[in-house]
Amino acid sequence: MTMATVIPAPVSRVSGEGDFSLTAATTVGGEPAVASYFAGLLGLGVGAVGEIQFTLGGAPAPGGYTLVVAPEGIRVEADDAAALFAGAQTLRQLLPPAAFAPVPRLGHWLVPATRIEDFPRFAYRGAMLDVARHFFPVDAVKRYIDDIAILKLNYLHLHLTDDQGWRIAIDSWPELTGVGAVTQVGGGGGGWYGKDDYREIVRYAASRFITVVPEIDLPGHTNAAIAAYPTLGDVPARPYEGIEVGFSSLAIRSESTYRFVDDVVRELAELTPGPYLHIGGDESLATSDDDFLAFIARATEIAARHGKTLIGWHEMGRSAELPSGTIGQYWGFTTPQEGAAEQTLSFINQGGRVIMSPADVAYLDIKYDQDSPVGLLWANGPTPLPDAYNWDPAEIIPGIEDHQLLGVEAPVWTETIATIGELEWLAFPRLAAIAEIAWSRRAGRQFAEFAPRLAQLGARWDAAGIGFSRVPEVHWLEKVDSP
């Protein structure tokens, strides 16, 4: 039995007797970071010991937590703070929708007695945000971090560079932002993150136990870089505001290109405390096969020197010279296109693992239906909510098993998205479906059981001011204005 209001579904739950009464006088104690975070959400006091206690020790499995609600108090136990934080997200969803208001007004809230033991299926549970096609300022990224934290996602992949814009300051190549960041899809200017901006995003994500994975897409998707520094390309480039792909390429045989790769990766690695750095490798249609393989072999060797585990889109698996342990990110369809399965398996054969992001079910920028006001249709779209829920990452590519999967990620590309409101409307509720696939067991997963829990979460999104698509497959609760 799963909790009526919890997404992702927990591993087990046993109902108890009675209720815990939560009031404005309730205090929170235990592990400082999580206790302070949870107390801050509700305006509660923090002490060494509280009626709500977050305690290190007693996890049911790696990454997991135990949550016990009893009339005398609430206890969350886990072996580390990140897992305690996951337990805090479950506890949030046991509270009334009013608890999700930006400034909650505590009443006399009753939390039913229960015992939950829970742990994740996959270690990597991610969301990707493309800030290159349209630029999103720091505050918008922080809001999305808070949004995804509710769903126990723990990685934010930032697609920082593309043909339309370069979004991260690199001191050794200043014109990457001086020239390369001033455009975006459809015009209206662009933007970029200074190093302090990026550090603030990383810091804020870490406070929600989310790790930032930066991406510099190479050797294609590089028009903005070439427009800033013409010697980086064999073909002249001008600032670009369209949405076509596959027309740009770095100059593969130029030594300047590899100085550029070394400098960019070095500076970005210095800014990024997390273990991963993504270097793209997709849709390099303007690069010959020989040049692509030569570039990947040399660029990945350079990038790996800077101490990060590399991630690349699955086309990078065409190379048999990847640094050992390189992670492949599969973005093909649930029925793999020609060559995609073999390219993805190449990462495993070279000592790495795979992140699953099949575009026809996990890409959040695809329209929900033909009438969606924003979004695209290219990945066998539209993608209704049941399609986003009814797939499994271990059933896409024959020969890949759970232990060879690092996890699951839901990308959102921003060709048609310019505001945080448009982003949230496309991402939710489908991101909740992907989060459940990433966290919960495969056995017993059914959309008919998921939909009522999603309706309850929708009421909490309403209270939080998160706009989402009220898709017809769910009987959503009537929206109630905050008092």
Image (cartoon, grey):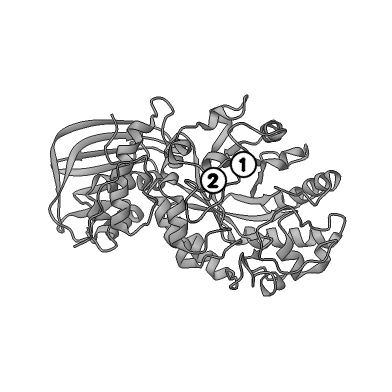
Q: Which mark is residue 29?
A: none
* Residue under the point 24% across and 50% down: 478
Q: Is residue 357 visible?
A: no
Residues under numbered marks 1 and 2 in contact, where contact means CB atoms less than 8 Å apart = yes
Quarter-of-image position of residue 64: top left
Q: Nearer the viewer, residue 108 or 195?
A: 108
Dot 1 or dot 2: first in sequence order is 1
Q: Which quadrant is the N terminus positioned in? A: top left
In the rendered image of this protein, does residue 77 appear above or below residue 335?
below
* Cα gap from disc 1 to disc 2, whole angstroms: 9 Å
In the rendered image of this protein, does residue 308 appear above or below residue 124?
below
Whole-percent x and y of residue 451? 34, 37
Instruction: Name the kind of residue labelled 2 in the image.
Output: Tyr
* Residue under the point 48% across and 56% down: 373
Classify residue 256 as left or right of residue 187: right
Most extreme residue toward the right is 253
Whole-percent x and y of residue 89? 33, 47
Tell me the residue that label 1 is attached to: 331
Instruction: Name the kind of residue labelled 1 in the image.
Output: Trp
Quarter-of-image position of residue 244: bottom right
Whole-percent x and y of residue 307? 66, 51
Quarter-of-image position of residue 465: bottom left
Whole-percent x and y of residue 40? 29, 60
- Crowding at label 1, few (<14), some or many (≥20) Cα neighbours within 10 Å? many
Most extreme residue toward the bottom is 178
Tell me the residue that label 2 is attached to: 363
Classify residue 103 as left or right of residue 229: left
Q: Is residue 415 visible?
A: yes
Classify residue 125 as left or right of residue 188: left
